[in-house]
Amino acid sequence: MKLSFVIVTRNVNKYIEGCLDSVFEAIAEVSTLGIEGEVFVVDNASSDGTARTAKSSHGSITLIENTADRGFAAAANKAIKRATGDLVFFVDPRTEVLSGSLRRILDHMETNTDCAIAGGKVIDKKDLTVRGARRLPGFITKLTEAFGLADMAPSSCLNHAAYGSKRLEQPAKVGYVPFTFACVRAEIFRNLGPLDERFFGGFADTDLCRRVSRALNPSWKVAFVPQARVRLLDGFAMKPEVQDFDLYGCAVVRHRVRSEMMYVWKNYCILNSFANTILDLTAHSMRFCINVLPVVGDCAKSRHNAVVVKETALAMVDTQLGTQYPATPWE
């Protein structure tokens, strides 16, 4: 068996060497089973020397350098086209693969031949879960997240998107797994096509998981394998959007809003897309009014709410109220 690893980078010079070290150690762990691996690093026009560091630390990688940032999906597809492995692994460059994790996913894929995509758990340096299994986006998940209900009670049913209080300690069938650390059978790309490059700011992984779960003849599954883990090397990564907004500005919100609108429009219908957008506008307008109040308000959150409303409205105008979407990465 051969494994292909795809790592998409942009300005992660501080972490790429540690990530690659862990990937090659993981490959070495399973090499005794007759498994070999190839590693692709696709750099999205980094300005901090990420590509140079990656090549100098591990000369055996295949480095693909883009002259511009076209998003995760477009970059990953370049590596997928050149990959020769039976399984394609996606690894976030800000993480390190923990010992035994690769074997856990391989065992699950071998014993569950109907599993097309399997993803692991992302933990921080304190072993707390940062990312795990998710439900596919829908009206209930949007309702609980837009009004902040999921944040208020993350361990309850209000956190619908992350399965609420349900503790997944064993491998389980789920809606989708983030491609922070995930494995996809190569035949999926041959049968269903590559990642949709129109998604610039996320949701390309969600979209592929939905396509897999809707496929027939054969019927495929998406699985979460909690024993397969990666640890964050960057303590500031993968924070709630309001915190990312404070660090990186409006682009964080813009990319998420546009990718989410594209996902709903593509997978549901124009009416659903319009309703989803109105829900976002209503929820964040209400939250803005609360967050500008003295004592109970939060200035940082009010700024975030205002930008969400602004970017959502601009996206509606760009798409002519959700009736037309671009055919290229929507930045």
Image: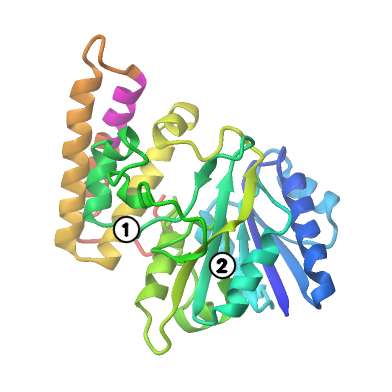
Which range of residues does the magenta coloring cover?
Answer: 300-308
Indicate the position of residue 152 as horizontal and vertical percent values: 31, 33
Q: Quadrant of the N terminus?
A: bottom right
| Crowding near the residue tagged with mark 2, few <14, some 14–19, many ≥20 C-alpha atoms within 10 Å | some
Label disc, if present, on residue 262 of the rendered structure:
1
Image vertical order of residue 79 relative to residue 24, above or below: below
> Disc 2 on helix, strand or loop?
helix
Indicate the position of residue 187 as horizontal and vertical percent values: 55, 82
Q: Is residue 328 visible?
A: no
Amino acid at the residue labelled 1: Met
Magenta span main SS: helix
Image vertical order of residue 54 relative to residue 90, above or below: above
Amino acid at the residue labelled 2: Asn
Q: Quadrant of residue 298?
A: top left
Q: Is residue 127 left or right of residue 159?
A: right
Q: Residue at x 22, y 46 (%)?
A: 143
Q: Residue at x 63, y 74 (%)?
A: 87
Q: Quadrant of residue 243?
A: top left
Asked whether 229 or 188 is in front, the reply is 229
Image vertical order of residue 194 relative to residue 206, above or below: below
Q: Is residue 1 left or right of residue 113?
A: right
Q: Quadrant of residue 82?
A: bottom right
Residue hosting label 2? 77
Q: Can residue 307 be found in the magenta stretch?
A: yes
Q: Can residue 24 be found in the magenta stretch?
A: no
Q: Earlier in the sequence, mark 2 or mark 1?
A: 2
